Amino acid sequence: VYVYQNYYLPIRQKLEPISQAQADEYYRLANEALQKGDLKTAEDNFRQALRAGDNQLYLEKYALVTYQLKQFDQSIDSYSQLILIKNDNASYWNSVGNVYRDAGKGEEAIKAYQKAFETDKKFVVAYSNLANLYLLRNDKEKAREVVEEGLKNNPNDKNLVSIGKNIK
């Protein structure tokens, strides 16, 4: 996974920084927009909230919303920034894998999923995502290997067992 330059630095350079109170209000508005299903308004407000600085929670929400809007470059940049903050978070690596997968960048997705379960061998979702990606590529052998590795670390996981049973 490639870690990009700070995506938010240009935002802070172009726009005046804001106070934490202002950022909190933008964050509140963004969450209201999310509740209404208005992803674009939520994205705009999360981006505005980030003008106060790289707040991990704001950045997580922004990364997810940009992913949902299929703004894959911004989402990858955001998750990469989160990884710089907390490199040992398997969920961040898994999310980067999902973004790469949906952006059609399978090799990058594979690396990210592998990093996720290298970071946390119990993070089952990454094994499942990688196995399913291999199945989409008709690579049943690699899918089987991932499922077997996942089951070594998570022997009772129903999802991995199910994926394994469906590999013929």
Image: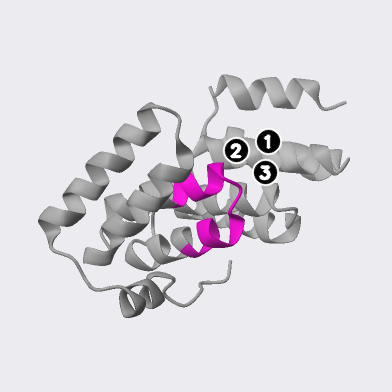
The x and y percentages for residue 63 are: 45, 52
Residue count near mark 2 (Cα–Cα under 10 Å), binned few <14, some 14–19, many ≥20: many
* Percent position of residue 73, x then y: 58, 62
Residue under the point 79% across and 22% down? 166
Callout 1–callout 2 Cβ contact below 8 Å? yes
Q: Is residue 36 left or right of residue 105?
A: left
Q: What amino acid is at disc 3? A: Leu
Q: Residue 147's mark?
A: 1
Placement of 4 over or under 164, stated as above or below:
below
Secondary-structure class at tag 1: helix
Q: Position of residue 65 (x, y in %)?
A: 46, 45
Q: Is residue 15 left or right of residue 160?
A: left
Q: Is residue 53 visible?
A: no
CA gap, disc 3 to disc 2?
10 Å
Residue drawn at the location 41% of the way across and 66% of the way down: 81
The N terminus - image quarter: bottom right
| C-beta proximity under 8 Å, tags 3 and 2 | no
User: Dot 3, crowdedness within 10 Å: few (<14), some or many (≥20)?
Assistant: many
Q: Secondary structure at mark 3?
A: helix
Q: Quadrant of the C terminus?
A: top right
- Sequence-first disc among 1 and 3: 3
Closer-to-camera residue (93/19): 19
For the magenta stretch, what is the residue range? 63-77
From the image, give the main secondary structure of the stretch colored magenta.
Answer: helix
Which of the marked residues, 3 or 2, is nearer the chain's N terminus? 3
Q: Nearer the viewer, mark 1 or mark 3?
A: 3
Instruction: Name the kind of residue labelled 1 in the image.
Output: Val
Instruction: Identify the residue position indicated by label 2 in the image.
Output: 150
Return the mark for residue 130: 3
Vertical placement of residue 116 versus 163, above or below: below
User: Mark 1 to mark 3: distance in Å?
Assistant: 9 Å
